[in-house]
Amino acid sequence: MNDDGYTLAEMLAALAILGMAIGGLGLVVSLIARQQLTANRTHMQLLNGRAADRALTLWLADVDAETLTGDSRSLSAACGLASCSALLEADKARTALILKGRLGPARRFRLRQRDVRFGYVADQGVVAGWPQPAVSGEEGLKETLHAVRLAAPGAAVPLAVARAWTREPRDCQFDAIIGACRVAAP
C-alpha cells in the first residue's frame, strides 16, 4: 500500500469537521434571522403607533375643537358641514383606531395594545370624557382642551397624543392672565 492518499479514517474525520462547520453556520444564520424578526416586529409596532399618532393629530387639526365631544371609546366633532368621528374598536389581541374624516372612507390603524382608551388633557389634568360638566359656582370658567391622547390603563407612556389647536377670532386680544381673548373696548 501507498501512503500517498487519505485513509478512510482521515476522510471521515474531515467530513465530520466540515459537517459541524456547516451546522454551526446554519445555527448562526437562524439566530440572526430570529433577532431580525424580533427587530422587524418592534419596528413595525413603532411605525403603526407613529402612524396612529400622526393620523389622530391631523384629524384633530381638521375638526372644530370647540364642538368636540367624546368619552373613553369614541369622540366626534364638526368638520365643515359633516360630522367627523374617531372610534376605538377592541378585539382579542389589540385595539384598532378608526378615523372618519371629512373626505374619503374611514381609515383604520392597528394599535399594539389592548384596552386602549381616549383621554382628554385639560387644565385640571387628564379626564375620561369631554366636555367636562361645569362645576357649581364656576359658571364663568370654562376648561380648555389641550390635547387628546390614546393610552392603555396603567401604561407609563401614551400611544398617541394629538394637540388641540384653539382657533381664536381675528380681532382677538389675548389676555395671559385669564387665558382667553378679551373683548376690545371701543
Image (cartoon, rainbow, N blue to C red):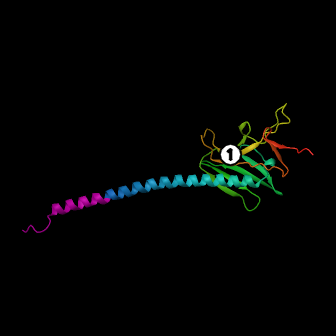
Q: 57 and 43: which one is in front?
A: 57
Q: Secondary structure at mark 1?
A: strand
Q: How far from the left and from the top, in percent, is residue 185?
A: 91, 44
Residue placed at 20% from the left, 61% from the top? 12
Range shown magenta = 1-22
Residue at the extreme left: 1
Q: 135 and 106: which one is in front?
A: 135
Q: How far from the left and from the top, in percent, is residue 162?
A: 69, 49
Residue at the extreme right: 186
Image quadrant where one finds the N terminus: bottom left
| Residue 179 image-quadrant placement | top right
Relative placement, left or right, of 33 versus 148 is: left
Relative placement, left or right, of 7 versus 101 is: left
- Under mark 1, the amino acid is Arg
| Up-down relation of residue 178 to residue 89 (above or below) | above
Residue placed at 82% from the left, 33% from the top? 135
- Structural crowding at the residue carrying mark 1, measured as other residues with C-alpha within 10 Å and reported as few (<14), some (14–19) or many (≥20): many
Which residue is the site of mark 1? 149
The answer to whether residue 21 is magenta is yes
Magenta span: predominant SS is helix
Residue placed at 75% from the left, 49% from the top? 165
Q: How far from the left and from the top, in percent, is residue 173?
A: 83, 46
Q: How far from the left and from the top, in percent, is residue 79?
A: 80, 55
